[in-house]
Every structure is written in structure tokens, then in C-alpha cells.
């Protein structure tokens, strides 16, 4: 079957990578909206327009399912997308629930884009599990910029993270949630400043499990792990620009 994986940029490649591992016998279209990234610092209506334009393009490629591998796009548009498109659409949300289920007595720090954290969907998620008193949001938009510019140099990223975490006593937290797919590239660097006793949780596994479930329900023939990359509506002819991000996850 053909699976679409969509993100504002390169962050969703972390989800693509996990999908390839779990579902190697499918074909993939990866769509990075490079012309409009970042989403997380832009107004909601503008982002919604970008998401719809991208998904309309992906729909023309006749995908059997679509993963919105972007917490920001999911929070802004998933409900409306599901009203318009017929194929299954799997979204992402900051993994607050699993974090709170692990421990309700200590605080949980949720890192994501500014837009995800100020959206109603996030507030609703927090109140639905009655965790307002232990959830603290921390927007980290700079990490999106780093990933888009292929900045993986340890010193640069670590010094930014150290500064961002400098006012927190991390021993008071049970988990740090990585609520943006771009942040997954830096998981090892987060670990360097977050004590071992604190969990680092992301939503990638949950999303890939959802995808597996949806594919079981649909009928279609197997593929062979082919990936076609698009940078906004332009096909990556050299297949290198985005593919190099898969390599750094190896
Ligand atoms: N990767 C996206 C997310 O998971 C958003 C990054 C951005 O465009 O700001 O939220």
C-alpha cells in the first residue's frame, strides 16, 4: 500500500524511519512543506491553509493512508481534514497521557512548538486527563530551525538546550515529553542534560502503532519500501536532500 507521511519539514522523517522499521513492505510518499516551514511560530489560519494545500497534493497521489507526522498540523487541522478526505488520517499529539500514566505525583515538562502549546487541543488534552496541576509547557522553536538547517553539531544544540533548561530543577519532574517531531533528532542530546531518573517520552511509537492498525483494516497489495520525497510540491529528483536525514537516524 502507499502511505503518505507529511510534516512542515524534516521532523516527520523520524516517524517515516520508525514506520519503515515496523512496516518495511509498504511504499511511502514523504512530503516536507519546506516552502512554509516552520509552522509552529505562525498564525493558526495560515498553517491550516498550508496543511490543506499539502494534503490535497498528497491525496492526488492516491495514498491508502496518511500520517500527519507533525504535532502542530495535527492540532490545527486534523478534525477538518478527516471531514474532507476519505482515506484514514493518523495524527500526532504530545505524549502527555503516557507520561502522566507513568507518574502522577511529579511534574511533566511538555516541549513542543509555541503553536501546539497554545492551541485548544493541547489544553483539552491536559484537562481531559486532569493533569493541569502537573503539566508545564516549554516551547522550543529553535530546534526546528536547527533541524531544517541540518545543524546537528553537539556543542551548538547542547548549549541552546542547557540555556532553555537552566531555570528548571529537573529532579522535580517525572518526564519530559518531546511533542514535536523535529525534536526527536536531538533525543540523545536531551538525554545528556536530563537526569536518567526522568523519562523522555515521544509520540512516534503510538503513531506508528495506529498506522499499523489502520492498515490491517484496509485491503491493498504490499509494496517494497520505496520512498518518494517531495519538498513542498516539488519532487526531490536527486533523492538526497531529504534522504540524508534518514541516514542521521541510523
Ligand atoms: N514537526 C512539527 C511538529 O511536530 C512542527 C515544526 C514546525 O514547523 O514548527 O510539531
Image (tube, helix red, strand yellow):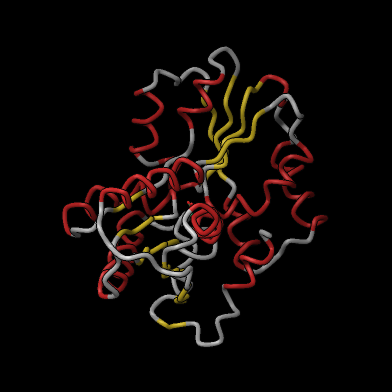
Query: Which of the pair 18/10 is nearer the observer?
Result: 18
x then y, percent, for residue 192: 79, 41
x then y, percent, for residue 179: 52, 43
Q: Quadrant of residue 241?
A: bottom right
Query: Which of the pair 235/74 is nearer the observer?
Result: 235
Query: Which of the pair 172/202 is nearer the observer?
Result: 202
Q: Residue at x 44, y 48 (%)?
A: 71
Q: In which quarter of the image is the C terminus?
A: bottom right
x then y, percent, for residue 97: 45, 28
Q: Residue furthest bottom?
A: 237
Residue 36 vertical placement versus 187 (above, below): below
Q: Which residue lies furthest to the top in this view?
A: 105
Q: Quadrant of residue 110?
A: top right
Residue 86 vertical placement versus 229 (above, below): above
Residue 207 vertical placement versus 201 (above, below): below
Query: Which of the pair 180/65 is nearer the observer?
Result: 65
Q: Residue at x 68, y 19 (%)?
A: 172
Q: Which residue is drawn at 31% across and 49% down?
A: 216
Q: Quadrant of residue 33?
A: bottom left
Q: In which quarter of the image is the N terminus?
A: bottom left
Residue 153 vertical placement versus 188 (above, below): below
Amino acid at each position: 500500500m502507499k502511505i503518505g507521511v507529511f510534516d512542515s519539514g524534516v521532523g516527520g522523517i523520524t516517524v517515516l524511519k520508525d514506520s519503515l522499521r515496523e512496516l518495511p513492505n509498504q511504499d511511502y510518499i514523504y512530503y516536507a512543506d519546506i516552502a512554509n516551514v516552520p509552522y509552529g511560530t505562525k498564525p493558526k489560519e495560515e498553517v491550516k491553509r498550508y496543511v490543506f494545500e499539502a494534503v490535497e497534493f498528497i491525496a492526488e497521489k492516491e495514498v491508502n493512508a496518511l500520517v500527519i507526522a507533525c504535532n502542530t498540523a495535527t492540532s490545527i487541522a486534523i478534525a477538518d481534514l478527516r471531514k474532507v478526505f476519505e482515506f484514514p488520517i493518523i495524527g500526532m499529539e504530545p505524549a502527555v497521557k503516557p507520561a502522566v500514566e507513568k507518574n502522577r505525583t511529579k511534574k511533566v515538562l511538555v516541549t513542543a512548538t509555541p503553536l501546539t502549546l497554545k492551541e485548544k487541543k493541547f489544553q483539552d488534552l491536559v484537562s481531559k486527563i486532569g493533569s493541569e496541576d502537573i503539566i508545564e509547557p516549554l516551547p522550543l522553536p529553535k530546534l526546528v530551525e536547527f533541524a531544517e538547517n541540518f545543524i546537528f553539531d553537539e556543542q551548538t544544540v547542547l548549549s541552546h538546550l542547557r540555556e532553555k533548561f537552566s531555570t528548571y530543577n529537573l529532579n522535580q519532574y517525572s518526564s519530559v515529553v518531546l511533542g514535536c517531531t523535529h525534536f526527536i533528532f536531538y533525543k540523545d542530546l536531551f538525554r545528556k542534560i536530563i537526569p536518567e531518573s526522568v523519562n523522555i517520552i515521544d509520540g512516534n511509537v503510538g503513531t506508528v502503532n495506529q498506522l499499523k492498525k489502520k492498515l490491517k483494516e484496509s485491503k491493498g497489495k504490499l509494496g517494497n519500501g520505496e520512498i518518494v520525497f517531495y519538498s513542498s510540491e516539488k519532487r526531490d529528483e536527486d533523492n538526497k536532500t531529504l534522504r540524508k536525514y534518514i541516514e542521521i537516524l541510523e
